[in-house]
Image (cartoon, grey):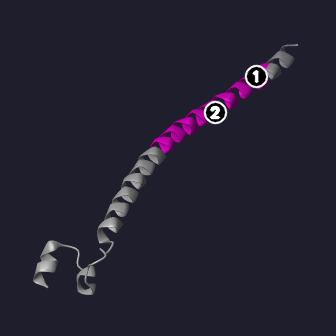
Amino acid sequence: KNEKLRAEMTKVENAFSDYRDKHEIQVGLVTELGQKTTEIARLTEEMRKLQEELGALQVSMTPVEDESEAARGLSTRTELVER
């Protein structure tokens, strides 16, 4: 009877150890998921800002109706004056 109880106890201890290991892995995965979610949010915001900046640059580079062909490639007042 003692031998049977020891075997059962060993089985329970092994199962407990296995669950503890799985729990530690789960905690690590949840932590990593939180970090990745935060990083994705940060990168999404950065991408939004860059897209806004790109849009503003594209608008600023759009030629005006009466703009000469020579002026179209220039982007600053200094470049226009030098021409």
| Numbered marks: total | 2
Q: Is residue 44 left or right of residue 16?
A: left
Task: Quickly name the residue at label 1.
Answer: 12
Residue 38 can be seen in this image = yes
Residue type (three-letter) at the residue carrying disc 1: Val
Secondary structure under the numbered disc 2 in the rendered image: helix
Which residue shows up at 68% across the image and 29% down it? 19
Which residue shows up at 86% across the image and 18% down it? 4
Closer to the camera, 71 or 25? 71
Image spot of residue 11 (x, y percent)? 78, 25
* Mark earlier in primary sequence (2, 1): 1
Residue range (magenta): 9-38
Q: Is residue 31 left or right of residue 70?
A: right
Prevailing secondary structure class for the magenta stretch in the rendered image: helix
Q: Is residue 6 magenta?
A: no
Closer to the camera, 70 or 39? 70
Which residue shows up at 34% across the image and 66% down it? 59
Image spot of residue 21 (x, y percent)? 63, 33
Q: Is residue 65 above or below residue 43?
A: below
Name the mark on residue 21: 2
Q: Is residue 20 above or below residue 71?
A: above
Name the mark on residue 30: none
Residue 73 can be seen in this image = no
Residue type (three-letter) at the residue carrying disc 2: Asp
Secondary structure under the numbered disc 1 in the rendered image: helix
Q: Is residue 55 left or right of residue 69?
A: right
User: How many residues crowd mark 2 within 10 Å: few (<14), some (14–19), many (20+)?
Assistant: few
Q: For the residues carrying marks 2 and 1, which lies nearer the camera in this image?
A: 2
